[in-house]
Amino acid sequence: MAASLVGAAFTVAPARRVGRARVSHKRSSAIRASARDEASSADAAPAVTRRQALSAVTAGVASLAAASPAFAGMFDGLELPSPAPGDVKAKREINLPKLEVDPISREEGAPLTNGGEKGRAQQQYLKFIEPIINENVDLPFGEYMRLALHDAGTFNVVGKKNGANGSIRFELDRPENADCKEAFASIERIKKKIDAVVTQPISWADVIAIVPHYAARIQFAKDYYEVMGPDDPNYEFLFVGTNPYLGAKVRIGRRDADAADPAGLVPGADATPEELVQWFKRMGLGPNQLCMFAPYLYKGDEAKGVDLAAQDGTNRAVLDQYASQRKLGKRAPGPAVTIIKKFKDMTDNCIPGGNPYVGGDRDPPYVEYARIRGGGEIPRVTTFGAFPGSADLGSSKFAQKVRGDR
């Protein structure tokens, strides 16, 4: 091949200057044509592996050596590695250090984590106790709502004093709370069930405020399926506003009082319409909340509360609006969503010191902390819900997957 090049005649085409480069017209055309040919060949050719390409290069070099003595012996001893069975590349093993989750104190962990992480940990806790609540609800939701109203009903929006703090457990002997004893006994049973399986007991204030959400949702679903049939798939879509994790996201983290709130702040059975209006106004609530609660104010007598509220002109207009919603029937989410939304207004706002979720609680309940090391993790502090096994929820999902040992 090399010998054939000796004495060969070459013709150089006239060149033109482009910038600082000299480019042959014919050579440029030849390069472009060659590029097009190579591109079309590449499109038509099957995919070639790296090993196949290397074999082809070696074979070409060997042919070159055979054709010309000048290259003879240059590639002696060249060997390709033997291909693995099936020409399949062995998978590299992932060898991560063991994940270490070391619990740390609240004092150390709380300053090193943000509010979003703490909020997620509390929602993990809430999700964990949800089945316990659902299994032990044994009263109509209106009974639990009345108990929650009487617990929060001592709240004074001026000064943000008293309110939803679990103090009703010290106030059941008061005449205005006589109709709350049955609901409190049910709440007490639910709380004992929860406390038996978590690592941080739930507060009285929280369990009183959140159980009505689940009790109402149970009743709403029952009413809906009675009308629409048990196989109707639309309940979750229509009643999203009653879902404690979506439209009506339940907040937890209320603190318990260690003594009773002042007496005389919750109207009794002989309350006048004016006293009911003033009661809700003192709590920072209005006609919407009062009219929603009206059917549940008095045990076994829904009409009494509605009739008293309707004696106020503003309340009457709101009650008419609610009545028109109820005419839609048990298959309509409107009344259900209204009940949950107005109930949530009370339980989230009538809290001693004000709503703790604005600005975040730096040291919320139901949150535990740990320092995570290894397993592909950057050393960090994580949060997780206060129940057994929840540390796994706070560690890396990727690390859990590749380790496969937790």
Image: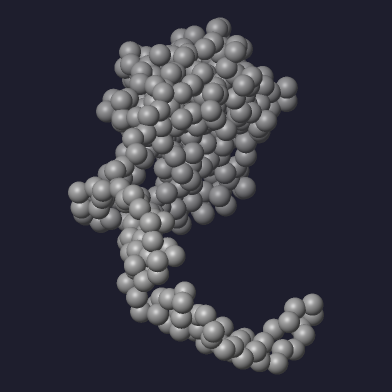
Residue 233, image x and y in percent?
28, 55
Q: Quadrant of the N terminus?
A: bottom left
Q: Position of residue 127 (x, y in %)?
A: 39, 31
Q: Is residue 23 left or right of residue 189?
A: right
- Whether residue 74 is visible to the viewer of this picture, yes or no, is yes
User: Which colour assignment does the render follow?
Assistant: one colour
Where residue 257 sits, quadrant-wise, is top right
How many marks are shown on the rendered structure? 0
Q: Is residue 35 above or below residue 301?
A: below
User: Can you say whether 199 is above or below 293 in the image?
Assistant: above
* Picture quadrant of residue 263: top right
Residue at left 56%, top 50%? 318
- Residue occupying image coordinates x 62% and y 21%: 112
Residue 276 visible somewhere in the drawing = no
> Please, is residue 195 above or below residue 121 in the view?
above
**Which quadrant is the C terminus positioned in?**
top left
Question: Looking at the image, which is closer to me, 282 or 355?
Answer: 355
Residue closer to the observer: 175 or 362: 362
Q: Position of residue 135 (x, y in %)?
A: 27, 28
**For the point 46% across and 23% down, which residue is it?**
374
The residue lying at 33 percent from left, 60 percent from top is 55
Q: Is residue 207 left or right of residue 155?
A: left
Q: Quadrant of residue 114?
A: top right
Q: Given the current orientation, which residue lies at the most extreme right position?
A: 19
Residue at the top extreme, as displayed? 259
Comparing 57 with 224, the one in front is 57
**Rendered location of residue 166, percent (x, y):** 51, 16
Residue 64 vs residue 180, the one in the foreground = 64
